[in-house]
Image (cartoon, rainbow, N blue to C red):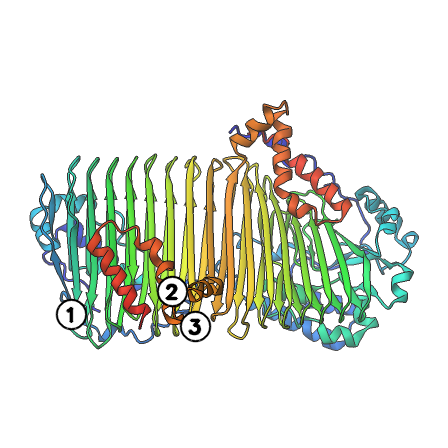
């Protein structure tokens, strides 16, 4: 296999531009308790939140990185700006969003038109939400879709009842960091029995350099309700690093269903260290569709805690590690109640020297009999400079369980290539077809626009990887 | 434990032992915070109460014939074949092994055996080594070195038994060299009495077009940590690694395997089958590592666990680290109970439930036993398992 030409790696990253935006709020670089106080003052937060943020910062400072997580030691926390905003408040009308920010979003294709396809749209730039709106038909049914900050102000009781209960700051170092500096993100509330059929979508943009984005999302899907939440993200290409450490907490109540789709396309300057967790009650269904195509390093294992009898968790994970990327993605399934089921399906591609790692946890507690879980991980390596790892952990207490894990790593086989090229298909197109066929089971679960976008990105990444 | 007495050692060995002892002393004792140790409890093992300064292991060797074949205990080997030992000993088990109990072994080993098969020689009858641990509150440290020169062939059966009422330590090491075109069928099993804490490290290096065929049996002891690693160092080499473990009562087993592909067109296959009963604990951690230039690797790894009680703890971690892009690498792991359909099938044909369960259990382990090419050893495995199954 020939070594691909490096300049073709990843293809053009069309989201890599940056705009000069006027900053309204900003703090000096580095983390400190005074930054926390500044944020609380600007946001006008209640005392309990101020206390929570300070406590979280203390936890962050004394929490060690886990031994199994390599490659993050050189992250310089003091080179990063923890709060910075070019907007003062979140607008409900697109026209009210400052013109220069609208221009940024126009360039990204997050235009007003898109709103017609979506039940709600949010747009975060750096630390704050610039825009957050929901269709009237949904808000009449009682669906709430706000920035997380607004959610705390308008629905303080629901907010406080759930906030940081699925992911407390003690959970891990980056959850603590987010808890101290969180800003933006979404607050979604779907009342009992309401089916929110049209997706709610949020786009996260980092514009500033050496910046840390810490959005916080809280989604509550009440009994028998349904919700599909879609997020996308991008950032400019700099020579320095930025940090994105989000926390997403989801509560799927009895018989409810939630689907959370992510298309992560950060520039290769961004450390993407995200904690995502869903607490799934009886007969509830949680589905994570997690696509990781960008970032310098992603550490993200969407998880389902199956706490009610008969709950179901599902993770579909797609990772594409191109030049300069390390996708450390995976899934966690924790069984805490009887008769629960789960499925993890992970596909990864590494090429142009990228590294894709699957890390997964399946944990069955003694009080969770009759549980079933199936894990499938497939990896494709495109060239000899790339790397693929699989690190699954299965911890089983007790007897009445069925756990199956299977993984395979392979290259684009000569037989497949020969078959296609002998039918007159160009080698590059053949590889592209094989790769698209490989990821198809996951891509078909994405909303149409995203599926098209993924195929475009993957094809760009394929260019020059002729085996 | 006291430092090794090196007065009679040649200088190269003295250096190894001193470095090993330093490593041992510097390493912290494993705790439950370490990923590998989360599920294990070895607090009953108190090193300071054990006598480790005199050999607690007696070895019994079968006799071997063959041109230039050397098969003797380590004391004889040191006296008569120091050159072979100096060339091979400590080359796979490094004196500064970063695991506490393996380093302790490297510092204090005081018994063992050497098998050396010269190039092109085929040893037709199995070579047997029986290690017996005796005495109370003792520590035994046997080292085995096997060298199969190019084109040579041998079958080795290594058996570990013994251990009296009080808690004893057994820390063993085996180094295996199978050179180009050589073949080794290697069977190793332990059926220690309860109260033995066993730490065993086995490492093999497999040369070009060479083959090693392992069968590992884990039956006795109260705790066993087993590290089995195979380095595929030459083009076209093959390793078949099969393991069987019957864990019952409060037995704890940690199985750590590594299939390390450093050369191209190498094949490795692995199957570890565990049965867990009562309050047993097992942790299988298996690594397949494929280096950048090891194109044409074909690696497979499978860990199957059959769980018979709701009090057991069963962990499995099959790991892949792949840096080559011309390969096929797969692994699978399962944890499950006896298949109700199969049970029903047998019962519908008139087998009492008890007996049907026994049949299924033995059938579950049979694929590993079937790898044993030495008839009496196969029988011994079968009987051992049969006794446990029908307890």
Q: Secondary structure at mark 1?
A: loop
Q: Mark 3 sits on what residue? A: B309
Q: CA distance from mark 2 to mark 1?
A: 28 Å
The picture quadrant where one finds residue A90 is bottom right
User: Residue B362, image x and y in percent?
Assistant: 34, 61
Question: Mark number for residue A321?
Answer: none
Q: Along the polypeptide, which appears first: circle 1 or circle 3?
A: 1
The total of numbered circles placed on residues is 3
Q: Is residue A32 visible?
A: no
User: Residue B293, image x and y in percent?
Assistant: 42, 35
* CB contact under 8 Å: marks 3 and 2: no
In the depicted structure, whether residue B145 falls above or below residue B22: above
| Residue positioned 21% across, 35% down in the render | B151
* Chain name for mark 2: B
In the depicted structure, whether residue B151 falls above or below residue A289: above
* Chain name for mark 1: B
Q: CA distance from mark 1 to mark 3?
A: 33 Å
């Amino acid at each position: 296999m020939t070594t691909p030409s490096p300049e073709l790696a990843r293809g053009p990253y069309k989201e890599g531009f940056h705009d000069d935006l006027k900053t309204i709020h900003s703090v000096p670089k580095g983390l400190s308790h005074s930054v926390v106080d500044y944020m609380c003052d600007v946001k006008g937060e209640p005392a309990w939140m101020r206390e929570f943020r300070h406590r979280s910062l203390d936890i962050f400072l004394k929490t060690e990185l886990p031994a199994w997580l390599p490659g993050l030691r050189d992250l310089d926390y003091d080179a990063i700006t923890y709060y910075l905003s070019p907007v003062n408040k979140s607008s409900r009308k697109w026209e009210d969003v400052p013109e220069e920010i609208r221009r940024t979003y126009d360039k990204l294709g997050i235009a007003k038109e898109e709103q017609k396809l979506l039940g709600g749209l949010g747009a975060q730039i750096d630390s704050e939400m610039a825009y957050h709106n929901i269709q009237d038909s949904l808000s009449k049914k009682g669906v709430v879709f706000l920035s997380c900050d607004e959610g705390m102000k308008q629905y303080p009781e629901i907010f406080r009842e759930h906030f940081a209960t699925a992911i407390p700051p003690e959970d891990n170092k980056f959850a603590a960091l987010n808890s101290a500096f969180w800003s933006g993100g979404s607050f979604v509330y779907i009342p009992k029995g309401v089916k929110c059929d049209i997706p709610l979508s949020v786009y996260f943009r980092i514009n500033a350099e050496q910046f840390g984005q810490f959005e916080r999302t809280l989604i509550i899907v009440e009994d028998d309700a349904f919700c599909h939440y879609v997020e996308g993200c991008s950032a400019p290409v700099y020579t320095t690093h930025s940090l994105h450490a989000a926390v997403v907490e989801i509560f799927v109540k009895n018989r409810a269903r939630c689907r959370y789709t992510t298309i992560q396309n950060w520039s290769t300057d961004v450390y993407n260290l995200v904690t995502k967790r869903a607490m799934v009650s009886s007969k509830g269904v949680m589905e994570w569709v997690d696509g990781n195509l960008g970032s310098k390093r992603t550490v993200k294992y969407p998880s389902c805690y199956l706490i009610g009898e008969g709950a179901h968790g599902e993770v579909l994970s797609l990772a594409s590690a191109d030049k300069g990327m390390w996708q450390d993605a995976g899934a966690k399934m924790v069984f805490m109640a009887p008769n629960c089921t789960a499925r993890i399906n992970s596909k990864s591609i590494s090429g142009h020297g990228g590294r894709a790692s699957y890390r997964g946890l399946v944990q069955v507690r003694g009080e969770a009999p009759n549980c079933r879980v199936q894990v499938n991980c497939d990896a494709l390596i495109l060239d000899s400079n790339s790397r693929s790892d699989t690190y699954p952990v299965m911890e089983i207490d007790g007897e009445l369980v069925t756990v199956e894990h299977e993984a395979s790593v392979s290259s684009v086989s000569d037989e497949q290539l020969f078959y296609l090229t002998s039918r007159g298909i160009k080698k590059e197109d053949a590889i592209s077809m094989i790769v698209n066929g490989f990821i198809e089971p996951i891509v078909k679960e994405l909303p149409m626009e995203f599926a098209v976008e993924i195929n475009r990105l993957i094809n760009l990444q394929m260019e020059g990887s002729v085996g | 434990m006291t430092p090794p007495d090196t007065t009679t050692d040649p200088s190269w060995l003295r250096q190894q032992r001193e470095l090993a002892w330093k490593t041992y002393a510097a390493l912290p004792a494993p705790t439950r915070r370490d990923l590998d140790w989360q599920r294990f409890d070895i607090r009953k093992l108190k090193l300071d109460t054990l006598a480790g300064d005199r050999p607690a292991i007696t070895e019994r060797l079968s006799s071997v014939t063959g041109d230039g074949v050397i098969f003797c205990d380590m004391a004889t080997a040191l006296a008569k074949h120091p050159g072979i030992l100096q060339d091979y000993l400590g080359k796979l088990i490094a004196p500064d092994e970063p695991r506490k109990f393996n380093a302790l072994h490297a510092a204090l080993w005081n018994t063992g055996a050497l098998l050396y098969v010269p190039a092109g020689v085929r040893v037709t009858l199995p070579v047997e080594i029986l290690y017996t641990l005796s005495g109370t509150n003792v520590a035994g440290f046997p080292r085995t070195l096997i060298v199969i020169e190019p084109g040579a062939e041998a079958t080795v059966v290594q058996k570990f038994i013994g251990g009296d009422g009080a808690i004893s330590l057994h820390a063993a090491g085996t180094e295996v060299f199978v050179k180009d075109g050589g073949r080794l069928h290697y069977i190793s099993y332990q059926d220690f009495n309860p109260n033995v804490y066993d730490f065993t490290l086995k490492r093999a290096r497999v040369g070009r077009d060479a083959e090693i065929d392992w069968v590992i049996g884990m039956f006795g002891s109260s705790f066993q940590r087993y590290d089995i690693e195979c380095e595929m160092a030459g083009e076209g080499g093959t390793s078949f690694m099969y393991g069987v473990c019957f864990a019952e009562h409060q037995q704890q087993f940690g199985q750590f395997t590594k299939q390390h592909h450093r050369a191209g067109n190498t094949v490795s296959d692995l199957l570890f089958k565990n049965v867990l009963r009562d309050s047993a604990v097992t942790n299988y951690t298996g690594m397949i590592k494929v280096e950048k230039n090891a194109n044409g690797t074909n690696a497979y790894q499978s860990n199957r666990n059959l769980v018979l009680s709701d009090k057991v703890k069963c962990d499995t971690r099959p790991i892949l680290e792949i840096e080559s892009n011309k390969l096929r690498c797969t692994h699978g792991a399962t944890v499950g109970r006896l298949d109700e359909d199969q049970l029903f099938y047998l019962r519908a044909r008139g087998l009492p439930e008890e007996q049907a369960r026994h049949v299924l259990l033995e059938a579950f382990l049979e694929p590993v036993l079937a790898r044993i090419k030495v008839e009496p050893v196969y029988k011994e495995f079968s009987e051992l398992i049969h006794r446990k199954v029908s307890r």
